[in-house]
Amino acid sequence: MAANSVEILHDFSPLLKHYKDGRIERLLGDDVVPPSVDPKSGVQSKDVEISPEINVSARLYLPKNPDRSKKLPLLVYFHGGGFFVASAFSSLYQKQLNLLVAEANVVAVSVNYRLAPEHPLPIAFEDSWLALEWIVSASTDEWIKDYADLNRVFFGGDSAGGNIAHNMALRIGTQKLDGINLYGIILNCPFFYGKDRIGNEGADHFIFFKNYNDKLLPYVCPSMSDYDEPWINPAKDEKLSSLGCKNVLVYVAEKDFLKDRGCYYKEILSKNGWNGDVELVEIKGEDHCFNVLYPDSENAIAILKKVASFINE
């Protein structure tokens, strides 16, 4: 096969193209912006290496003028992108985390996990757990030691990142991690799925997305047996009642193909013995992860304030 072949093996436009010569072209979130001091909010950011030998890292955020005498909640954020595009260092997530940190007045760790297909699932989950272990380790960065309250920790994420936040919370509940008290999780249009269609997933205008996900999941996780594996379909997880927090905020978008999965998540949490509070917020007229793509919109700002309230209530 000639170098730089234009023949496509896997086409996941508008996110990724995988060519027959092995070349992978990421079409979204592939830009990298440096850490900075945000001129609007005063939020500072910097990058840290968690495990350089396997290229796991994070971007840390600190609000303007933090007070050492009163530690702040810690938000651990997992970016979206279908498990195979985007990064914690893209302009989309730099802006999203600057806004979140400023509004909620939190310390944040935005995890940069490795991506499929080069690093297929469950690698993203293992990298994310490694980041959590790093947070509680003795050598953790001074921003976390000086300013973060590890007794009030939140996990958050959008789309695939929402899936990771859920799976990390479940692992906290079943495996434990001394040094972190997980207070709540925040799931933005979480990427859950299943073998059987629910809600409006069978509607004609959603057929494209159903076919897309049917192909995407085996691509990012070649070892999966079916679409009902617990990591992607929490309704099939016998350990769901062990979710390691007592507070959950899920927000979904009216036009999103994944909306019914997010709604179903609330339902199954309530029915499967989990002892906590879950709140579901549906945003009318919006589509998947609209607030990440359009963070200055009216609905995105409203969600930002909702998340800040959830963290600080």
Image (cartoon, rainbow, N blue to C red):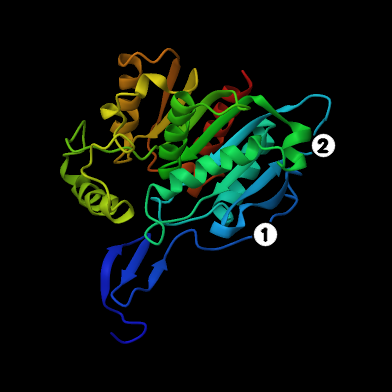
Q: Is residue 164 left or right of residue 200?
A: right
**Quarter of the figure with residue 110:** top right
Q: Amino acid at mark 2?
A: Asn
Q: Amino acid at mark 1?
A: Pro
Name which residue lies at 71% across and 51% down.
46
Name which residue lies at 83% across and 30% down.
68
- Towards the viewer: 286 or 250: 250
Residue 289 seen in this snapshot: no
Q: Is residue 146 left or right of residue 123?
A: right
Q: Is residue 230 above or below residue 216?
A: above
Tell me if mark 2 has few (under 14), some (14-19) or many (20+) residues whose alpha carbon lies within 10 angstroms of its own: few
Task: Tell me the residue that label 2 is attached to.
Answer: 65
Q: Position of residue 260 (x, y in %)?
A: 29, 32
Q: Position of residue 182 (x, y in %)?
A: 56, 25
Q: Is residue 84 above or below residue 231?
A: below
Q: Is residue 307 left or right of residue 171?
A: right
Quarter of the figure with the N terminus: bottom left
Q: Is residue 223 above or below residue 283?
A: below
- Towards the viewer: 279 or 142: 142
Separation of marks 1 and 2 at Cα, in angstroms: 21 Å
Q: Is residue 8 above or below residue 77?
A: below
Q: Is residue 129 left or right of residue 284?
A: right
Q: Position of residue 38 (x, y in %)?
A: 72, 49
Of label 1 and label 2, which has the lower sequence position? Answer: 1
* Local secondary structure at mark 2: loop
Q: Are dots 1 and 2 in contact, CB under 8 Å? A: no
* Local secondary structure at mark 1: loop
**Quarter of the figure with residue 137:** top right
Task: Tell me the residue that label 1 is attached to.
Answer: 34
- Towards the viewer: 230 or 301: 230
